[in-house]
Image (tube, rainbow, N blue to C red):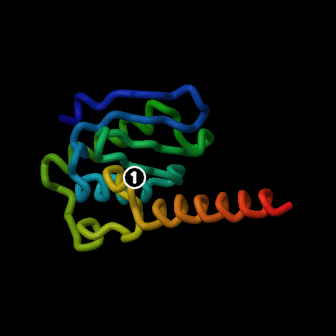
Amino acid sequence: MPETIAIVHNKVPARIRIRVPLIRNKRTLAELLKQNLLQAKGIYHAEPNIVTGTFLIKYHPALHTETEVIEQVRATARNISAGTVEITAKHKNPKLGKMQPQAFFTRELIVSIGGNVIAGLILAALIARG
């Protein structure tokens, strides 16, 4: 599976989106890959998207080339596939509170819409009075 890792987008300097089929619909493996990538000096942001199976990576160009970052992802994915990377409780329980892609209609969205409706009604009442 690591052989199918490919660039999705790399037009912005020091920022690359890579397709990593290993993480598609696998939150634990995505978190494991993320934590391993962030341990590398010069990679300061790694954001997985398990729905699309992609990774957004930001790195310092003075420390890494795009090719080195891709090879780092391939090597780490290869190690995860081979089972040589330990999965800990930290990887199984990523931070709570992050909005999941399938959870669009959340309490916050409903509160936001309700607040806008109420504000609109108040504004309409003020305009009608004045």
Quarter residue 70 falls in: top left
Q: Position of residue 9 (x, y in %)?
A: 47, 28
Q: Residue furthest right?
A: 130
Residue at numbered disc 1: 37
Q: Position of residue 119 (x, y in %)?
A: 66, 63
Task: Check disc 1 and report its element: helix, strand or loop.
Answer: helix
Quarter residue 120 falls in: bottom right
The vertical placement of 113 against 79, above or below, is below
Residue at 13%, 48% (x, y): give it.
82
Residue at 69%, 65% (x, y): give it.
122
Instruction: Please tell me how crowded label 1 is: few (under 14), some (14-19), or many (20+) other residues with Cα within 10 Å.
Output: many
Q: Quadrant of the C terminus?
A: bottom right
Q: Position of residue 27 (x, y in %)?
A: 25, 56
Lateral position of residue 127 relative to residue 43, left or right: right
Q: Which of the pair 71/98 is nearer the observer?
A: 98
Q: Which of the pair 53/77 is nearer the observer?
A: 53
Q: Amino acid at mark 1?
A: Leu
Quarter residue 1 falls in: top left
Residue at 65%, 61% (x, y): give it.
121
Q: Which of the pair 125/6 is nearer the observer?
A: 125
Q: Number of marks in the image?
A: 1
Q: Which of the pair 35/79 is nearer the observer?
A: 35
Q: Position of residue 7 (x, y in %)?
A: 40, 28
